[in-house]
Amino acid sequence: MSRIGMLVFGSLALAGCGSLLETTIPAPQSYVLRLPVSIATSAATPAGSILVQRPEPGPGLDSWNIALLRSDRRFDFYAASHWAAPAPDLVESVLIDALRAGGGFTSVLDDSSPFAPRYNLRCGLRRFEADYTVGGVPTVFVSLECTVGRHRDRELLGSFVAEGSAVASEDRLNAIVAAFEAASTQAVGALERAAREAVARDPVPAQTN
């Protein structure tokens, strides 16, 4: 076979391989949470700075996937969809945005901040899934087990559970993500109120930080 013939044959072969690699599988959809700013009420006297640590995920929740609990108590994930970040990072971002918008603290810091805060907020992400165990459309549950303490001497000021739940309007992913937003709004609102109550019990006089 001539060199030109070999090149033509090779081009046709590659074209054939390209058609074999084509797929009709839809590209995964990426979702974020956008909570309403109105979930928090500005405080008259901010309580100093607070650092929000990345939530410690429960089993199966340290993932980009959108988790669901099937009727047989089997943990699973929605196909062809995921969060825009791993669930703990997504929740951390939501917490920081909400606490900043609420005005209850002079500043709200994340784990990367080089500044020492007055308070630390540590949470365990215990539930963050769509629950199908009762059948029909899912109910989304969000549950955070939290502690608040002084950063300087690690004095514990309070511990609490902040939870929220919301029934999806239909068994479609857009409606389920909306239910995640509604449940997260409840949980974050409860968290901010409890965190403010915890730091209000701080016997040490407030500093400027």
Image (cartoon, rainbow, N blue to C red):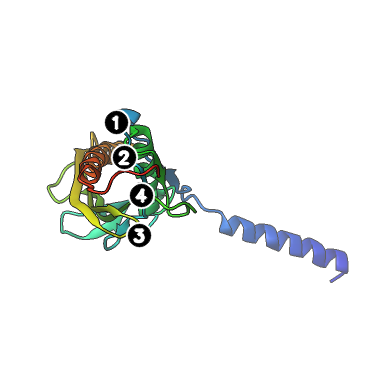
Q: Residue at x 19, y 53 (%)?
A: 159
Q: Which residue is nearer to you in this view: 39 or 182?
A: 39
Q: CA distance from mark 2 to mark 1?
A: 9 Å
Task: Verify CB contact (< 8 Å) between mark 4 and mark 2.
Answer: yes
Task: Verify CB contact (< 8 Å) between mark 2 and mark 3.
Answer: no
Task: Verify CB contact (< 8 Å) between mark 4 and mark 3.
Answer: no
**Which residue appears farthest toward the bottom when viewing the image?**
1
Q: Which residue is nearer to you in this view: 52 or 185?
A: 52
**Which residue appears farthest toward the front when viewing the image?**
205
Quadrant position of residue 163: top left
In the picture of the structure, the residue carrying the numbered disc 2 is: 47
- Residue 86, horizontal then vertical, whole percent: 40, 54
Quadrant of the rendering where the C terminus is positioned: top left
Q: The residue tagged with tag 4: helix, strand or loop?
A: loop
Q: Which residue is nearer to you in this view: 139 or 163?
A: 163
Task: Verify CB contact (< 8 Å) between mark 2 and mark 1.
Answer: yes
Q: Which residue is nearer to you in this view: 89 or 96?
A: 96
Q: CA distance from mark 1 to mark 4?
A: 17 Å
Q: Amino acid at mark 1?
A: Ala
Quadrant position of residue 19: bottom right
Q: Amino acid at mark 2?
A: Ala
Q: CA distance from mark 4 to mark 3?
A: 28 Å
